[in-house]
Image (tube, rainbow, N blue to C red):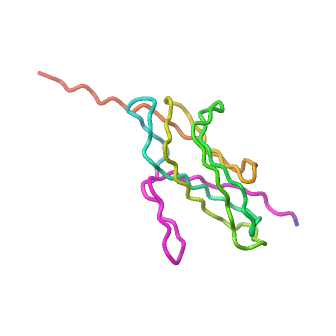
Amino acid sequence: MENEPTIMPAIILSDSVIREHGSGKLSFIGCFAQWNGPRFPFQVPPFYITPIIANLRRGGAAIPAVIRIEKKGGLSIWSSEGRVTLPESNLPDGLVIELPTPAMGVTFPEPSMYTIQVLIDGELVGHRDFFVQTLPTPPAAKTS
Protein backbone atom coordinates (compact mmCIF):
# COMPACT_ATOMS: atom_id res chain seq x y z
CA MET A 1 0.00 0.00 0.00
CA GLU A 2 1.34 3.42 -0.97
CA ASN A 3 1.56 6.17 1.65
CA GLU A 4 -0.80 9.10 1.39
CA PRO A 5 0.89 12.34 0.24
CA THR A 6 1.78 15.10 2.68
CA ILE A 7 -1.11 17.58 2.67
CA MET A 8 -2.10 20.77 4.43
CA PRO A 9 -5.78 20.85 5.41
CA ALA A 10 -5.52 24.36 6.92
CA ILE A 11 -3.41 27.46 7.50
CA ILE A 12 -4.69 29.51 10.46
CA LEU A 13 -3.89 33.21 10.96
CA SER A 14 -4.14 34.55 14.51
CA ASP A 15 -2.87 37.29 16.81
CA SER A 16 -1.45 34.74 19.24
CA VAL A 17 -1.14 31.00 19.91
CA ILE A 18 -0.94 29.31 23.31
CA ARG A 19 0.14 25.67 23.70
CA GLU A 20 -1.27 24.06 26.85
CA HIS A 21 1.29 22.45 29.13
CA GLY A 22 0.71 18.71 29.38
CA SER A 23 -1.95 18.20 26.70
CA GLY A 24 -0.11 20.13 23.97
CA LYS A 25 -3.44 21.55 22.75
CA LEU A 26 -3.31 24.86 20.89
CA SER A 27 -5.54 27.85 21.61
CA PHE A 28 -5.74 30.39 18.80
CA ILE A 29 -6.34 33.95 20.01
CA GLY A 30 -7.82 36.49 17.60
CA CYS A 31 -8.18 34.43 14.41
CA PHE A 32 -8.65 36.46 11.25
CA ALA A 33 -8.96 36.02 7.48
CA GLN A 34 -7.76 39.37 6.07
CA TRP A 35 -6.02 42.63 6.95
CA ASN A 36 -7.51 46.12 6.58
CA GLY A 37 -4.85 48.83 6.40
CA PRO A 38 -5.36 52.57 6.89
CA ARG A 39 -2.58 53.42 4.37
CA PHE A 40 0.11 51.68 2.36
CA PRO A 41 2.75 50.43 2.73
CA PHE A 42 1.11 48.84 5.78
CA GLN A 43 3.25 47.21 8.50
CA VAL A 44 1.15 44.81 10.53
CA PRO A 45 1.71 43.94 14.19
CA PRO A 46 3.29 40.54 14.92
CA PHE A 47 0.94 37.60 14.32
CA TYR A 48 1.06 33.82 13.89
CA ILE A 49 0.80 31.61 10.82
CA THR A 50 -0.08 28.03 11.83
CA PRO A 51 0.09 25.43 9.08
CA ILE A 52 -1.74 22.18 9.90
CA ILE A 53 0.13 19.35 8.16
CA ALA A 54 -1.00 15.74 7.68
CA ASN A 55 1.00 12.69 6.60
CA LEU A 56 4.47 14.08 7.35
CA ARG A 57 6.36 10.81 7.72
CA ARG A 58 10.03 11.54 8.10
CA GLY A 59 10.26 11.47 11.88
CA GLY A 60 13.66 11.28 13.52
CA ALA A 61 15.22 13.78 11.09
CA ALA A 62 15.31 17.57 10.86
CA ILE A 63 13.24 18.46 7.77
CA PRO A 64 13.67 21.92 6.18
CA ALA A 65 10.49 24.01 6.26
CA VAL A 66 9.78 27.41 4.68
CA ILE A 67 6.74 29.64 5.16
CA ARG A 68 6.50 32.66 2.91
CA ILE A 69 4.05 35.39 2.01
CA GLU A 70 3.91 36.46 -1.63
CA LYS A 71 1.99 39.15 -3.43
CA LYS A 72 -0.08 37.62 -6.24
CA GLY A 73 2.35 37.33 -9.12
CA GLY A 74 5.28 35.96 -7.12
CA LEU A 75 6.84 38.94 -5.26
CA SER A 76 7.96 37.55 -1.88
CA ILE A 77 7.39 40.04 0.95
CA TRP A 78 8.24 37.83 3.98
CA SER A 79 9.61 34.39 4.74
CA SER A 80 10.66 32.19 7.64
CA GLU A 81 12.92 29.16 7.39
CA GLY A 82 13.42 26.45 9.97
CA ARG A 83 13.47 22.74 10.56
CA VAL A 84 10.73 20.40 11.71
CA THR A 85 11.96 17.55 13.91
CA LEU A 86 9.61 14.76 14.91
CA PRO A 87 10.78 12.20 17.46
CA GLU A 88 9.73 8.89 15.90
CA SER A 89 11.15 7.42 12.72
CA ASN A 90 7.95 5.65 11.53
CA LEU A 91 5.03 8.07 11.64
CA PRO A 92 1.53 6.81 10.81
CA ASP A 93 -0.61 7.96 7.88
CA GLY A 94 -3.01 10.69 8.95
CA LEU A 95 -0.80 12.05 11.76
CA VAL A 96 -1.52 15.80 12.02
CA ILE A 97 1.02 18.31 13.31
CA GLU A 98 0.67 22.04 13.88
CA LEU A 99 3.52 24.47 13.26
CA PRO A 100 2.74 27.84 14.93
CA THR A 101 5.18 30.32 13.41
CA PRO A 102 5.52 33.95 14.52
CA ALA A 103 5.46 36.47 11.68
CA MET A 104 7.18 39.72 12.61
CA GLY A 105 8.07 42.72 10.47
CA VAL A 106 5.55 41.96 7.70
CA THR A 107 4.81 44.98 5.50
CA PHE A 108 2.21 44.84 2.76
CA PRO A 109 3.19 47.24 -0.04
CA GLU A 110 -0.35 47.72 -1.39
CA PRO A 111 -3.92 46.42 -1.17
CA SER A 112 -4.00 43.13 -3.07
CA MET A 113 -4.44 39.38 -2.79
CA TYR A 114 -1.51 37.67 -1.07
CA THR A 115 -0.61 34.00 -0.71
CA ILE A 116 0.97 32.09 2.16
CA GLN A 117 2.99 29.16 0.86
CA VAL A 118 4.39 26.30 2.95
CA LEU A 119 7.27 24.20 1.64
CA ILE A 120 8.49 21.06 3.40
CA ASP A 121 11.84 19.72 2.21
CA GLY A 122 11.60 22.02 -0.83
CA GLU A 123 8.14 20.75 -1.87
CA LEU A 124 5.08 23.02 -1.85
CA VAL A 125 2.62 21.18 0.41
CA GLY A 126 0.01 23.89 0.88
CA HIS A 127 -1.02 27.48 0.34
CA ARG A 128 -3.71 29.94 1.33
CA ASP A 129 -4.82 33.16 -0.35
CA PHE A 130 -5.96 36.16 1.67
CA PHE A 131 -6.77 39.81 0.99
CA VAL A 132 -5.19 42.97 2.31
CA GLN A 133 -7.59 45.85 1.77
CA THR A 134 -7.80 49.56 2.43
CA LEU A 135 -9.63 50.32 5.65
CA PRO A 136 -13.06 51.71 4.75
CA THR A 137 -13.29 55.48 5.22
CA PRO A 138 -15.93 56.39 7.81
CA PRO A 139 -18.75 58.56 6.44
CA ALA A 140 -18.26 62.29 6.86
CA ALA A 141 -20.08 63.82 9.81
CA LYS A 142 -23.11 65.86 8.82
CA THR A 143 -23.20 69.46 9.98
CA SER A 144 -26.37 71.42 10.26
Residue 26's place in the image compared with 128, above or below, is: below
Rendered location of residue 38, percent (x, y): 38, 32
Q: Is residue 75 above or below residue 51?
A: above
Q: Is residue 119 left or right of residue 69?
A: right
Residue 92 lies in the magenta stretch:
no
Q: Which residue is outermost to the top? A: 144
Q: Residue furthest left?
A: 144
Name the residue rendered at 62%, 44% in the picture. 68
Q: Which stretch appears magenta?
A: 2-31
The mark tally for this picture is 0
Whole-percent x, y for residue 61 in the image? 75, 65
Q: Main secondary structure of the magenta part?
A: strand
Q: Quadrant of residue 116?
A: top right
Write down the quadrant of residue 74 in the picture: top right
Residue 63 rendering spot, x and y as whole percentages: 73, 59
Q: Is residue 20 found left or right of 8 in the rendered image?
A: left
Residue at image location 49% in from the left, 30% down from the top: 111
Q: Is residue 61 left or right of residue 113?
A: right
